[in-house]
Image (cartoon, rainbow, N blue to C red):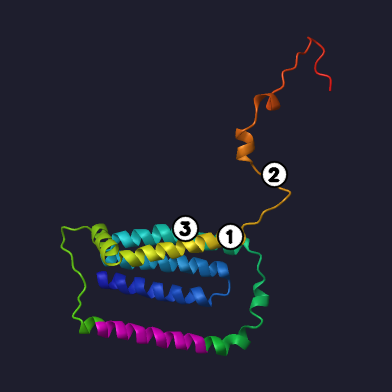
Amino acid sequence: MLAIAFYILAAVTVVSGALVITARNPVHSVLFLILAFFSAAGLFVLMGAEFLAMLLVVVYVGAVAVLFLFVVMMLDVDFTKLRQGFANYLPIGMVVGILLLIELIMISSAVAQRGAAAGQSPQVYGAEMSNIEAIGRVLYTDYVYVFQASGLVLLVAMIGAIVLTLQHRTYVKRQDIHTQVTRRRKDAVAIVKVKTGEGIKE
């Protein structure tokens, strides 16, 4: 039963991943991406990594994929103009893709040979340790510097996005905290004596 579930989820993941890059409608691509995330989460559950499956659904499906969907729907992009020069750049794109594939194969084979030569084996924890604790130990001990570096990269990217998109408009009224705090009572409050039945004359 587990083998059948694995093959079904794996097939759905591969097919939906291929449809993400082949679908012409960007909204359909995002929906196929969500399907791929759900199928990958199912594979994590079959492997006993429930925490990773939950993170994949909550973070990627609940935040990233929905954000992509809203961005694609909000952007008024003319995709017909973008596809006009697709045939001209297709050979260059194929060459770049093949080079990247060759590099990934070479890197993965080199890493595998180095690990085998060094006699390294994956760390196996006992049943008394939960999945979250095992991931936390590996993440915050063996890969703590890489984890901090990735957080720094994300921080720099966030600051760069804010700097690039921030626009100071001169016609917009902005709040001046210093002026509000240092304002005197006599400048802000005026006591006017009004006679009954007359009102205030400007």
Contact? badges 2 and 3 (CB < 8 Å): no
Q: Is residue 148 above or below residue 90?
A: above
User: Residue at coordinates 62% horizontally, 33% vertically from top-left?
Assistant: 182
Nearer-N-terminus badge (2/1)? 1
Quadrant of the frame with the N terminus: bottom left
The quadrant holding residue 198 is top right
Q: Is residue 104 magenta?
A: yes
Crowd around label 3: few <14 · some 14–19 · many ≥20 (10 Å): few
In this view, the mark in front (2 or 3): 2
User: Residue at coordinates 75% horizontally, 13% vertically from top-left?
Assistant: 193
Q: Residue 185 location in percent, x, y?
A: 65, 25
Q: Residue 48 location in percent, x, y?
A: 25, 64
Numbered mark located on residue 173 in the image = 2
Label 1 sits on a secondary structure element that is helix
Horizontal side, residue 115 vs residue 18: left or right:
left
Numbered mark located on residue 163 in the image = 1
Residues drawn in magenta: 95-114
Nearer-N-terminus badge (2/3)? 3
Magenta span: predominant SS is helix
User: Residue at coordinates 58% horizontally, 60% vertically from top-left?
Assistant: 163
The quadrant holding residue 78 is bottom right
Residue type highlighted by circle 2: Lys
Q: What distance separates the C-alpha of mark 1 from that of mark 3?
A: 23 Å
Q: Is residue 189 magenta?
A: no
Q: Which residue is mark 3?
A: 63
